[in-house]
Amino acid sequence: MGHRVRLGWVLAFGLSGLAACGQELVLPQRGQTAAEGGDQGPSEGTTGASGAPSDEPPGKLPVLDRPVFTTFGGAGGEDSAEPSRPSPSSRGGAGTTGGSKNQGGAASASHDSTAGEGGAGGGGSEPAPPAVLLFSEYVEGSGSFKALEIFALQGGSLEGCELQTYSNGKQEPASLALHGHLALGEMHVLCSSGDKGLGAAHPELCNRITNLTFNGDDALALSCAGVVQDIIGEIGVDPGDSWGVGATLDHTLQRRCSVTAGRADNQQPFDIDAEWITWGQDTFSDLGKRACAEP
């Protein structure tokens, strides 16, 4: 009898000790995670054996042959919830989407929201190279008769090219953007606008009628993609009334046929006789014909 009392006292003390330490024996239910107490399905992002489907009835306790680990944020071999970002080299390129490219560079049916950023996007062709340009004729005639003939030493696009007018020795130009395309040896003639301009009097000589504001004492430049290709006069210099003792005032200048490159070095003096033939006032009937025969 005494032994039984002592054994009952030991069992009672042991159970009460476990309760005091907060230890509780809990048998896992199906789909129960470390963060959940109810009988619910596997939580999102859970990996391991507890997330595997089973045909056993819900009430049956699973027999685990390895520990169960609960992970968050797509670990355990799952793809991350954050979508992958394209590399900078894929933006604005040949129109590829999702790692594939259609013929001609067009975007495939699986659209990429970043396709075309910073570039053509849908077109796989490279932009045409700029033309290499030369002033081939200069007209500063009576009244508002003004014209410039531009010759293509090398064919290419005129996009990104411009006529720059530096008035009265200024360092900052007034710019006129050029457009279109010139083949090798082709010319583009700009004529002055207005009722008394050359464009109104002789439109058949002109490719474009626009506002030409230069006078005999102004410097002119052709620039493509920010690179100066040819200069008439000297940028930043005021020569007085004209360049070359009246040559650029009330005269027509034709570039000599021997000139095969533009004058892009503004540090060199503007030597008209070395590169130009001087004609009298209002000589412009050969605009667009590249007439450069030596007199």
Image (spheres, grey):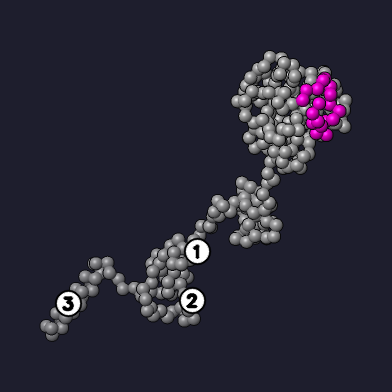
Amino acid type, label 3:
Trp
Pointer 1 local density, CA inside 10 Å: few below 14, some 14–19, many at least 20: few
In terms of sequence position, does the residue under pointer 1 or pointer 2 come before the other?
2
Vertical side of 28 occupied by 100: above or below: above
Coordinates of residue 77 in the picture (x, y in percent): 46, 67
User: Along the line of sight, which residue is nearer the eye, 167 or 238?
Assistant: 238
Is there a contact, CB below 8 Å, between mark 1 and mark 2?
Answer: no
Q: Regarding mark 3 in the picture, which secondary structure is present there?
A: helix
Vertical side of 180 occupied by 44: above or below: below
Amino acid type, label 2:
Pro
Coordinates of residue 276 in the picture (x, y in percent): 74, 26
| Residue at 36%, 73% in the rendered image | 67
Residue named by callout 2 = 53
Pointer 2 local density, CA inside 10 Å: few below 14, some 14–19, many at least 20: few
Residue named by callout 3 = 9
Q: Which numbered marker is on residue 24?
A: none
Which residues fall within the magenta stretch?
Answer: 277-295
Residue named by callout 1 = 79
Residue 163 visible from this viewpoint: yes
Which mark lies nearer to you, 3 or 1? 1
Amino acid type, label 1:
Asp
Q: Regarding mark 2 in the picture, which secondary structure is present there?
A: loop
Is there a contact, CB below 8 Å, between mark 3 and mark 1?
Answer: no
| Residue at 49%, 61% in the rendered image | 80
- Looking at the rendered image, the quarter that the N terminus falls into is bottom left
| Residue at 78%, 39% in the rendered image | 186
Q: Find the distance from the CA under tag 3 to the CA under tag 1.
A: 57 Å
**182 is within the stretch colored magenta:** no
Apparent side of residue 259 relative to residue 200 in the rendered image (left or right): left
